[in-house]
Image: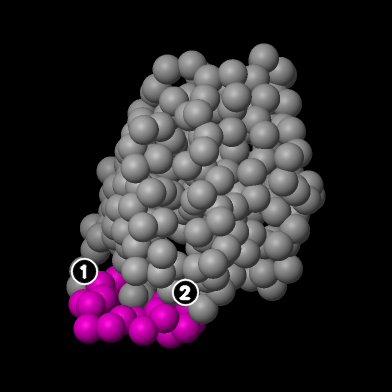
Amino acid sequence: MTLTQAHSWYELEELDDGLVRITEPHVDKLVRANLWWLRGTDRDLVVDAGLGVASLRRHIPKMFERDPLVVLTHAHLDHVGGAHEFTERAAHKAAQELLAQGVPSSLHGPELYRKLGVEAGGEEMPALLIDALPHPGYDPTAYRVEPLTVHRVLEDGDTIDLGGRALTVLHLPGHTPGCIALLEERTGALFTGDVVYNGHLIDDLPESAPSDYRRSLARLADLDLSTAHPGHGRSFSGSRLRELAHQYLSGPSA
């Protein structure tokens, strides 16, 4: 497959209340994750860091003007690939060791599944997880996620104060042991990472724990939320989040 250079690697969507959704349109949907950029009075926060194929600093320099904190919702390549570009990184303590080792990574679908220890189960895997190059001469075979130091270790109940807005850390294991979400109580908005999104919830990875996942979703089902900003796909209502949580909880293992 011969790939051409992308005209623009990142797509930015300005939302209300100082929030920007950032996506990578040239990345396969399997690993096309959201980055959420929140502007506070004193400091900015970025939730997750994308695949890391193209430099965030080069393509979105304005995002780094106030030295933002990046919070990693869990240790998967599509959420941490660009985290090395930030001067301060935060994650749950259960994700810290894996991030320090360097998370399994590849831009080749079958190789990534092998590294993750996941069976395709008859599902057709994309040979390559990008459909364009970020710049001339880019070699997809050289892609890897660098080992990352976590500067701020997060636990359930911790508060991240940006000035004018604050977010509370919710530890919600199940998809992975170190999954977290960030709740802005003032607005009722929840940045969910991969704990919940508007689609099939993945609980069968080698590090997944369905029993933990059930407890995490039961916790979310009891929260009065206005909006969910997920790790994949578009935002949706708090009522839809509760519906998704109840669907999972009433599933085969109920």
Report helix, strand or loop for mark 2: loop
Relative to 232, say whether 65 is above or below.
above
Examine the structure image and report whether residue 250 is included in the region drawn in magenta. Answer: no
| Horizontal side, residue 230 vs residue 95: left or right | left
Task: Name the residue carrying label 2.
Answer: 205
The answer to which image quadrant residue 4 occupies is bottom left
Give the residue at the far front of this rendering: 254
Query: Residue 83: image x %, image y %?
Result: 61, 51
Report helix, strand or loop for mark 1: loop
Q: Main secondary structure of the magenta part?
A: loop
Magenta residues span: 110-128
Nearer to us in this view, 250 or 116: 250
Nearer to us in this view, 80 or 1: 80
Relative to 245, say whether 43 is above or below.
above
Quadrant position of the C terminus in the picture: bottom left
Relative to 154, say whether 250 is above or below.
below
Relative to 150, say whether 141 is above or below.
below
Q: Which mark is residue 2?
A: 1
| Horizontal side, residue 249 vs residue 162: left or right | left
Query: Residue 114: image x %, image y %?
Result: 43, 85
Residue at 33% across / 52% down in the picture?
247
Residue at 70% across / 54% down in the picture?
92
**Marked residue nearer the N-terminal end (2 or 1):** 1
Res 25 visible: yes
Query: Residue 179: image x %, image y %?
Result: 59, 55
Res 64 visible: no
Q: How far is disc 2 from disc 1 in space, using C-alphas?
A: 32 Å
Q: Amino acid at mark 1?
A: Thr
